[in-house]
Amino acid sequence: MKLHYDAKTYNKLDRPWDSVVRFIKVTLPGMGWSKGEEAEVVMDVGCGPGKLTSQFILPCFPKLKKIIALDAIPGMIEEAESSHPHPKIEYAVANFEERSSVIQWKGQITKFICIQCFNRIKNQENAFKTIYDLLPPKGEAALLFLLHNGYYNAILKIAEDPNWKSFFTVNVTDCIPESHLKKYSALHYKDMVKDVGFTIRYCREKQNVTTFANDEEYIEFYYSVCSLVPYIPPSKVDEFKRDLLFYIIEENGRNSDGTPVDKTTTLELVLEK
C-alpha cells in the first residue's frame, strides 16, 4: 500500500510534538550535536513540508555546511521548497528504502536525523545498514519514531467496519508499522542496531500525550496522512472522517475538558558508527 499524504493540509496543521522539540533542542545538544568542530553535512530523512528541518534542525548546527532534506512524497518537497526555503537546505525527492537513491552520499553524512518517519520503513534492518554506510567513522545518527499509536488500532477497526470493509481492496495491515503489530520494544531495536555495527549512545522509550485544539483539527490531521483515503469515494468523505474520528477517540480518549488527545509510544535513538 502506497503512502498517502495531503501535503498542503499537513503543512497547515504540522506542529512538532513537545517530545520532538525536546529531543532536538535538549537531548541532541546535550550530547554534543551543536558543538562539532567541522562543517556538518546533515541528512534529514522524512523532512515533510520542511518546517522541522528549517526551524528546528538547522539551528542545531552553528557550523553547518548543508542539510540534505529528503522525502518520498513529491508534494511534500514542493511544499518545503515553497514554504521553508533556505540557502543551506537542499530538498530532494528520494525514497530512503531504495538504497540507490541515497548511496551517492556514502561516507559523507556527518549527522543523520530521521524524525517520525522510520516507523513507515518496511525493512528497517536494511535501512539501518544504509544509514551506517552513509556515515564516516564516528558519524552519528539520531532517530525518533513511533512504536505504538492508538490511531493504528483505529485503522484496523474501521477496515473491519461493515460500512467500510468493501471499499478496501488491499491488505490494510500493510499501512500499519510492524513495531505496532508485533508490539516491539526498545530491546528489539537495540539488538538490531548492534548487529549492524552501531554503538548506542542513547536509547529511550517514551509515552507521549498530545492535545489537539478540537475534533476538526484532530481528524483533519489524521485524514491528511491516512493511507486509506484513496479508497474513499468523494461522496463518502465526511462520513468516513466521522467514523474514523470515532474509532481514534475510542482508542486515545479525551481530556477532562473534552479536547481530543493523541497517545503514542516513541523510541529515541542516538547511534555512533
Image (cartoon, rainbow, N blue to C red):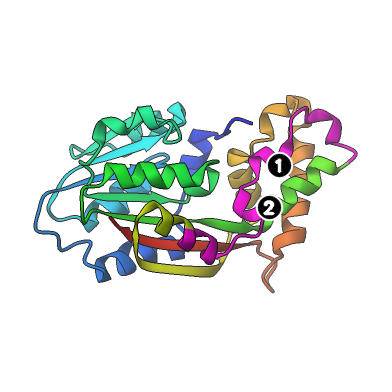
- Residues rendered magenta in the picture: 162-191
Instruction: Indicate whether residue 175 is drawn in magenta.
Output: yes
Mark 2, other Cα within 10 Å: few <14 / some 14–19 / many ≥20 = few
The amino acid beneath tag 1 is: Thr
Given residues 218 and 68, the one toward you in this image is: 68
The location of residue 143, given as percent across then percent down, is: 40, 55
Q: Which one is earlier in the sequence, the residue at label 1 or at label 2? A: 1
The location of residue 73, given as percent across then percent down, is: 47, 30
Residue under label 2: 181
Asked if marks 1 and 2 touch (Cβ < 8 Å), the reply is yes
The location of residue 169, given as percent across then percent down, is: 78, 27
Given residues 118 and 197, the one toward you in this image is: 197
Q: Is residue 181 above or below residue 240?
A: below
Residue under label 1: 173
Quarter holding the C terminus is: bottom left
Q: Is residue 39 above or below residue 70?
A: below
Q: Residue at x 72, y 28 (%)?
A: 231
Q: Is residue 84 left or right of residue 172?
A: left
Q: CA distance from mark 1 to mark 2?
A: 8 Å
Q: SS of the residue at dot 2?
A: helix
